[in-house]
Amino acid sequence: MAEPKAFRCVTCGREFPPWSVDYFCPRCGFPAGNLEVLYDRDKPLRHFPDPTRFSLWRYGELLPVGEEHAVRLRAGGTPLYPWAQAAEELGLGALWIKDDTLQPTASCKDRGTAVTVAVAKRLGRKALACASTGNAASSLAGFCAAGGIPCYIFVPKNAPAPKIAQLVAFGAFVFRVDGNYDQAFALALAASQEFGWYNRSDGLNPMVVEGNKTVAFEIWEELGDVPEAVVVAVGDGAVIAGVCKGFLELKEAGLAPRVPKVFGVQAAGAAAVAHAFARFQRGEPILPAEEPAETLADSIRVGKPADVVKAVKYVAETGGGYVTASDPELLSAARELARRAGVFAEPSGAAPYAALLRLVREGALGQKDRVVLIITGSGLKDPQGVTRDLPEPPLIRPDLRAVREAVERCA
């Protein structure tokens, strides 16, 4: 592990001794005063990655807690698939799919959870809490179940049933909040302060970003280089903040010659971070954003993104940007990804593919660019969302003639 040198406010730059504050700068408040974790860059990395580890803990020299505090679920180590056919069709140098649907609880959220739960154990915290549209909640519930830790979950009333099922199966104490995600988030924060629970919520706890950054380390390690561009879906902003921070740290450590452009994609009806980025590009300050959020992609249905400052600041440092995709584009991307690449993603998980099509169409990416799409959540999380408006399979008689007739109809 790497003992943090300091926690720094992303807005005012004030630094705090490690572990002296949990979530945000007292002066700037939340969410403007979110914290970032700093390390001693003069200390050489001797075992990075550690070949004796087969999970995200192989990158322990750039993580704030050691594997001795981790629970037994293994986060990280997900496959990176080449997709040569799509790369050729789109005129790209190369294209890969980073399939984080294969994490223990079927989403990328397990990276941030693994590190956050380990930190909670190191700090002696007895219970954890989280607000989530579903994936972070099921992730925390699963890891807490593995560690025998009490877990309190706050989800909006419209969270998909399969995600609620995971929470109940893992034995979490679930609060279905009669409101949207932002209201669930505010209630989880208030309850954590009232009852002393350690809060894992995206965009609040800086340890989440520390876990999320390991996906960048894995891409770098498997490719032996960094690509020209990486595309990832954005809700609260914590995942893309982690992706950017990982690549920035690789360059700072002298392990990568450059940083890829990181592109975030948001649903057109829930694009507060994308709008904040556009304002920042016009020279305006990064301010906490709040907008209506309407999209079928529940995992990125966030109107008040908590990690907006990092999500804007870090993406700008990479030279990347933001695009939006309509709900029909998200559904189309999810179905095409399943049928052509064999990866079953929920609509938000497939958002990077929808964004890639637009980035190529608009000339932002081209023939010399090698691109990685990070697929963040499994289609099993929201199967009804992916299959809506699709016809049901035909019901046939149990004989070969019926099979032949059905095949001829489909031909």
Image: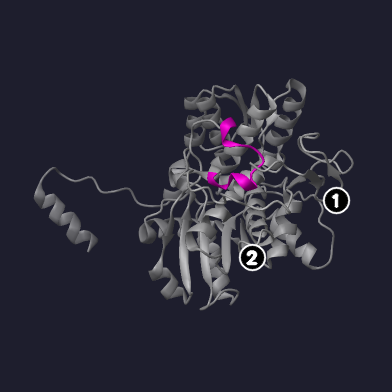
Q: Which residue is identified by label 1?
A: 13
- The numbered disc on residue 259 is 2
- Left or right: residue 278 compared with residue 216: right
Q: How many marks?
A: 2
The residue lying at 70 percent from left, 30 percent from top is: 188
Q: Secondary structure at mark 2?
A: loop
The residue lying at 48 percent from left, 56 percent from top is: 98
Q: Position of residue 61 (x, y in %)?
A: 62, 46
- Span highlighted in magenta in the image: 58-69
Badge 1 amino acid: Gly
Residue 297 seen anywhere in this rendered image of the structure = yes
Prevailing secondary structure class for the magenta stretch in the rendered image: helix
Nearer-the-camera pick, 30 or 245: 245
User: Is residue 274 positioned above or below 181 on the image?
Assistant: below
Nearer-the-camera pick, 298 or 171: 171
Q: Could you tell which of marks 1 and 2 lies nearer the N-terminus?
A: 1
Identify the image quadrant of the C terminus: bottom left
Q: Is residue 384 magenta?
A: no
Q: Is residue 65 magenta?
A: yes
The residue lying at 55 percent from left, 67 percent from top is: 227
The extreme right residue here reads 27
Rendered image quadrant of residue 153: top right
